[in-house]
Amino acid sequence: MNGRVDFHVHSNRSCDGDYSPAELVGFAREKEFRAISIADHDTVAAYPEAVELGRAAGVEVIPGIELTTVYSGREFHLLLPFVDWGSPTLAALIERQERCRTDEAVERVDKLRQLGLDITWEEVRDKANGSPPLGIKIAQILLDKPGSEGNPILEFFYRPENRAAAPYLFYREFFAEGRLAYVPKNFAGLLDVLAEAPATGGVPVLSHPGAYFQQTTREDARALRARGLAGLEVYTSYHTAEQVRLYKGLAEELDLVPTAGSDFHGRIKPHVVFGAMEEGGYWMVERLRERKGGRA
């Protein structure tokens, strides 16, 4: 039952991850993690390679994915550890997500161009690691362009105090609801995904419930628990100490498995270092395994 675990790391198979599955497994071995889950955005392209690499290195790699969904008018992210990467149900979900993500990204880029920003869909597509880009990836591509720093519209993001978090600040300024480049969400409904989760083999765990775009309430969690949610990512780089206490208590109240996930990406999240998540324990893996197949 002992050993450190991180249920939420991203590889370069995700549009915004920097490191290969092999590198992530290497980091995990170096940091003496017993298990990790590579949970890329709306793709399982890291598998089965990642599982085989982990087996060779003595690190358990739990197949996973992070799906973008919509619930109560907000964007919610759902982890599915233990997912069957060959599941036809999962393949259909991913196909839909890719269409939605691509449509959203094209429209976001078009809106940025209308605002006078120098960016094209072709360059975004070519730099997105072969998968539809998230808003934060579009922001990173734009801000990395040599000519962008001289644009007065973007001056704020190049200030020394803002550079490290510039893609996130850009997202909130341009892509958040009500902002000039906002595109309404058209992803799969969270309740629909929860209904289909047992057929994918995955165990539904709500990512970073306290993230600014989710702000999961007690009522949300109760409703989702009744529809098949099995776990809650209590320990995450998104949460303050106060939020950790709040969601830990909520997990206990609703009999949800508390999990730990750093949401490590690499350069796009310089403040999140691999191995910084101390709270993940292998007991979380055992408890989630008990809930495979939709068992309460």
Image (cartoon, rainbow, N blue to C red):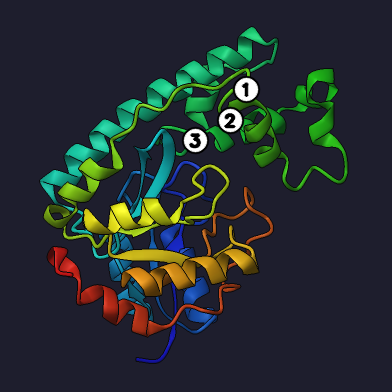
Above or below residue 147? Residue 225 is below
Numbered disc 3: secondary structure: loop
The amino acid sitting under disc 3 is Leu
Residue at 76% in and 27% down: 146
The amino acid sitting under disc 1 is Arg
**Residues under numbered marks 3 and 1 in contact, where contact means CB atoms less than 8 Å apart:** no
**Residues under numbered marks 1 and 2 in contact, where contact means CB atoms less than 8 Å apart:** yes
Q: Quadrant of the C terminus?
A: bottom left
Residue extending farthest front: 219
Residue under label 3: 134
Residue 291 lies, in percent from the top left, at 20, 71
Residue 32 lies, in percent from the top left, at 50, 84
Numbered disc 1: secondary structure: loop
Q: Earlier in the sequence, mark 3 or mark 1?
A: 3
Taking 290 as reference, is 119 left or right? right
Relative to the observer, which residue lies in front, 228 or 82? 228
Relative to the observer, which residue lies in front, 255 or 62? 255
Numbered disc 2: secondary structure: loop
Q: Neighbour class for label 2 at 10 Å: few (<14), some, many (≥20)?
A: some
Q: Quadrant of the N terminus?
A: bottom left
The amino acid sitting under disc 2 is Ala
Relative to the observer, which residue lies in front, 55 or 240? 240
Give the CA distance from mark 2 to mark 3.
12 Å
Residue under label 2: 176
Task: Using the image, tell me which numbered label, if any, was put on residue 179.
Answer: 1
Relative to the observer, which residue lies in front, 53 or 258? 258
